[in-house]
Amino acid sequence: MNLNQRAWAAAQAIVDQPEQFQAIVSHSRCGVQILDLGVNATGGGEAGIKMAEVCLAGLGEVRFLPGQLPGVPLDVLVQTDQPVLACMGSQYAGWKVQQGDFFAMASGAMRACADKEPLITELGFAESAEVAVGVLETAQIPPDEVCADLAKQCSVEPQQLRLLVARTASRAGHVQIVARSVETALHKLHELHFDLRKIVRAEGTAPLPPLSANDVQGIGRTNDAILYGGQVTLWVDADEDEIAQIGPQIPSSSSSAYGTPFEKILRDAKFDFYQIDPMLFSPAQVTFIPVKTNKRQVFGETSPELLRESFGV
């Protein structure tokens, strides 16, 4: 199952109908195709959903649900029957792209082509492909030299690389980040050495915050949406004792940093993510359902008070 070919197909709708997604389609000088969904383009909720589905390499469904939190109209739902491949092989933002004044957090199927991360190697998801697709969380359109370098690292011709871009403080940017509830749960489980192959299906929801005034506020609110409002359900081929042992370690409340709005945590860490407890990055609540018994076990809970403080509602 080639992730990049699937992602390329998933992104084709934006190329074919940019006006539907309020997108701007352009090419860098070297030939890389750039799909702007929230840097200079207006983008929007539909653009964010498509961006999230491309991030999942077309292996998951993303949609809006009526919001559970008063004052927050929408939640973002993500569902996948290929959770490990979709979330760890493609969606996880494990690649920092930094060159000169340009910075982006990169996710998407191109990570499997570039094979730069230990995570891709550990899970055996490295692939070669004729095309590559990446998603960049950035406030800038990537300059030509960055585009050319990404194509080189992915071992494809520039004309065969497609980049979707949106800043954090855009509507599409908010949606594609909040659609990472399942991804954070899986990454936490991987860090705790749980065998991810035991996860057979996953779904998650998190509240969509109001559009932020700037990227720092956007980073804060979108992380809070998952840390204090994310609810993930995992169907697993594991016994109840194993679930009972690892379950309490998964929710964000297992971290000593829990209980503070993420923007404040980030500022206190002087914007150095490596100074923040990595165990914080997970959903507020995780439900495990063993496929053999269907006896669900629930760990953690949401924090409406912290969400209201963060979202200003």
Image (cartoon, grey):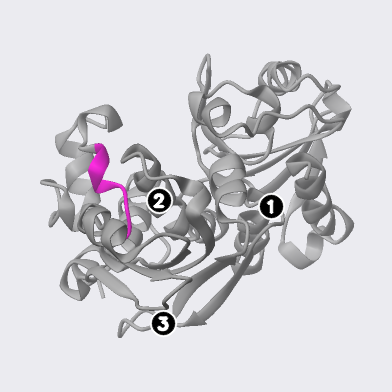
Please determine whether, in this image, residue 312 is positioned above or below residue 70: above
Q: CA distance from mark 2 to mark 1?
A: 17 Å
Q: Position of residue 73 (x, y in %)?
A: 43, 82
Q: Quadrant of the N terminus?
A: top right
Q: Who's the residue at 82% across and 23% down the image? A: 156
Q: Element type at marker 2?
A: helix
Q: Quadrant of the C terminus?
A: bottom left
Type of residue at label 1?
Val
Query: Mark 2 = which residue?
Result: 184
Q: Who's the residue at 52% across and 53% down the image? A: 173
Are there few (<14), some (14-19), or many (20+) residues within 10 Å of tag 3? Answer: some
Which of 298 and 220 lies nearest the eye of the viewer? 298
Q: Earlier in the sequence, mark 2 or mark 1?
A: 1
Q: Earlier in the sequence, mark 3 or mark 2?
A: 3
Between label 3 and label 2, give the one nearer the viewer: 2
Type of residue at label 3?
Gly
Visible residue check, residue 177: no
Query: Mark 3 = which residue?
Result: 67
Query: Mark 1 = which residue?
Result: 54
Q: Position of residue 49 (x, y in %)?
A: 62, 64
